[in-house]
Amino acid sequence: MRRVRKETLISLCAVVAVVALVAGSLLTLQQTSAQSRHSTTSTIKGVSNAYADGGSLTLGAGSSSSSSVGALYPATVGCSLSSAQQTSSGASLGLNGGGQGGAVTDTVSASAYTSSVTVTSSSTVNAVNLLGGVITANTIVVKTHSSATTTTAGVSVDQTTFTNLKVNGQSVNPTPNQTISLAGIGTVVLDERIGLVNTFNNTSLTVNGIDVHITTPILGLPVGTQLIVGHAMSQFTRTAASGLVGARSYGLHSTGVSGSLSALSGPYAFEVIGCYGGHGAVSLGATSLASILSLGAMTDSAMGQIFPSYYPHPGATSEATSTINSLGLGTVGTTLLNTGTINVQANASYVSSSNHSTSGSVTLTNGSILSGLLPSPLPTNPGPNTQLSIPLLGTVTLNEQVVANTSNSVSIRVTAIDIAVTVPLNLLGLPVGAHIYIGVAGAYASLPS
C-alpha cells in the first residue's frame, strides 16, 4: 500500500486553523519565505484545507550514508472558510542520496465567496534530477483544485504538468498513476492521484508528481525508502462543527540551510491531529545530521477533544508534546550546545470568551552552552523567551513562546530551543538567517461564534 503523508490523511486541518483564524500563522512550520493574506468569509458552512510541499525523502531501515528529509518548504491553509493564501519557497531541493532539484515554490489558497468556495494547492519544482539521472525533468508543477457551491456537489481535479520528463533516459508524458519499473532500484509512480472524493459534503484530492519506492538498496538508500517530489492536496468539507482544535509537534525543523546542510530541513518525528480532535504519537531513533547536529531518540504527540454543548463543561482542548533524549551541536573538538533530555509541552483550552487559557513549558537536563572559552550550564526550567549568545554563531532562545487570542480562539506555539545564525563565516558553515528549531509543540482551541 502506498504511503500517504500523515497531514494529508487527516486533512491537514489540525493547527493550520490558525492560518485563517489567527494572524501570523502561529502553528504552521517556520519557513524560509512565507506570505499570507485573509479576507472575506462565505455563507457556506464548512472547512477548506490545502497543503503543498516540494518533496521529501523517507528512509527505510538500515541507511548508513543518508538521512531522511522531511517535507521541504511546506505551505498550508485550513480549518476555516475565510479566504487565505500562503506561499513558501526555496532556492533548491536537496534530498540527500535521492537526488536534488532547483528552485521550489509551494502555494496554497482558499477563496470564499457568498455562495461558493475554491481551494487550490500547487508545488513547482525546477531542474529535477533523481537517483543519479534516472529521473529528470525541467519543471514539475503538481496542482490540485477543489470547489463547491451552496447547491452543488464538490469537485476536485488534477492540473499537474511535466516539462521534458525523462525516466530511464526515455521521454514520458505520464498518464495518471502511471507506474514504471526502475531496473535495480524499484518503481516510480508518476502523477499519482490519491483519495479522490467528489460528493456533496466532501471533495478532496492528493497528488504526488513523482513517487519513487526503493526495492533494491542503491546510493545508500535502503529497501523501503520513499522519495516524493511535488506534493499537493486540496479539500473542502461541509460541516456544522461546534468547535475546532489543533495540535502538532516535531523534534527538528530548520530554515535557511542549503547544499550539504539541507538534511537539517525536516520536520522530523512530525505528529498532527485533525480539526475535530483525536490523538497520536510518533517516534524516531537517534539522528545525526550534516556532521554538526546529533539528536537522541525523538517522541512527539498531539491530542485534542471537543466537548459538545450538552456536556457539563462544553468547550475545546488540545495538547502537544515533544521529547528529545539528547542534543549535541558543534564540530569535532568544539561543542557549542549540548543537553540531556528535552521536554516541551503546549496546551490550549477554550470554553467561553471569559474562560480560556494557554500554557507552555520546557525542561532541559544536563544542558550547557559555550560561553567564551568554557561551557556554561543551561537552566533546567528556562523562563519564556530566554535568550543567550553562542560565540561565533549567533543566539539561542530557550522556551520560545508565541501566544495569540481572538474573540473565539486561543493558540500557543512553544519551541524548546531556537538557534538563530547571525555571524557570517561561523564555525558550522551555516548561512546568516538560518534557524534550527529543536522540540516544537503547538496547540489551538476554538468555539466558532
Image (cartoon, rainbow, N blue to C red):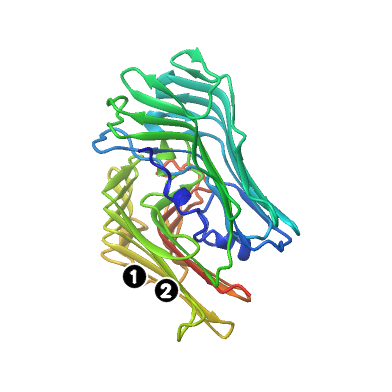
User: Relative to residue 322, is residue 204 depicted above or below?
Assistant: above
Q: Who is closer to the viewer here, 406 or 316?
A: 316
Q: Who is closer to the viewer here, 223 or 412?
A: 223
Q: Residue furthest right?
A: 114
Look at label 1 and name its amino acid.
Pro
Question: Label 2: which residue?
Answer: 383
Give the structural element (helix, strand or loop) at label 1. loop
* Rendered image quadrant of residue 186: top left
Look at label 2 and name its amino acid.
Gly
Give the structural element (helix, strand or loop) at label 2. loop
Task: Name the image quarter holding the C terminus.
Answer: bottom right
Give coordinates of residue 7: x percent, y percent.
46, 51
Give coordinates of residue 389: x percent, y percent.
44, 60
- Mark 1 packing: few (<14 Cα in 10 Å), some, or many (20+)? some
Which residue sits at x=40%, y=66%?
303
* Rendered image quadrant of residue 428: top left
Give coordinates of residue 76: x percent, y percent.
56, 51
User: Relative to residue 135, is residue 96 depicted above or below?
Assistant: below
Q: Who is closer to the viewer here, 418 or 216?
A: 216
Question: Label 1: which residue?
Answer: 379
Give coordinates of residue 256: x percent, y percent.
51, 44
* Left or right, 369 with reference to 92: left
Query: Can the viewer see residue 449 in this picture?
Result: yes
Q: Who is closer to the viewer here, 217 or 292?
A: 217
